[in-house]
Image: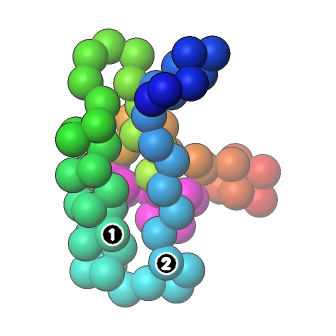
Amino acid sequence: RGMKNLDPRGYMGIAPAEGAPEELRAAFAEARKIFDRDFTGPGCRLSLGMSGDYELAVEAGSTLPRIGGSLFA
């Protein structure tokens, strides 16, 4: 926060590889909790989820899931 030339707009999180759905839900929920604590306002992004778990990530509030693997498979 003290670095005047940086303007962070959100967080990106990666869930545990091969995690069970409940484990992923818990990880995404914790990331959302931290994001909500640190960021407010327009233009903020929470990037969670990848091709295999993006539905759970969106359910948790991800605004920018990464689904490249599904697009280019």
Badge 2: how crowded within 10 Å, few (<14), some, or many (20+)? few
Badge 1: how crowded within 10 Å, few (<14), some, or many (20+)? many
Q: What residue lies at 46% left-to-right and 42% top-to-bottom?
A: 11
The quadrant of the image that shows the N terminus is top left
Residue 16 marker: 2
Residue 59 appears in the picture as rendered: no
Q: Secondary structure at mark 2?
A: loop
Front one among 32 and 69: 32
Give amino acid for label 1.
Ala
Question: Is residue 69 covered in magenta?
Answer: no
Give amino acid for label 2.
Pro
Please state the extent of the stretch shown in magenta in the rendering.
49-59
Please say if 26 is above or below 57. Answer: below
Q: Is residue 52 left or right of residue 38?
A: right
* Residue 60: percent from left, percent from top: 25, 53
Q: What residue lies at 26% left-to-right and 80% top-to-bottom?
A: 22
Task: Tell me which label, 1 or 2, sits earlier in the chain.
Answer: 2
Residue 27 marker: 1
Q: Is residue 44 left or right of residue 68?
A: left
Dots 1, 2 in contact, CB < 8 A: yes
Q: Colour scheme of this structure image?
A: rainbow
Q: CA distance from mark 1 to mark 2?
A: 8 Å
* Residue 68: percent from left, percent from top: 69, 48
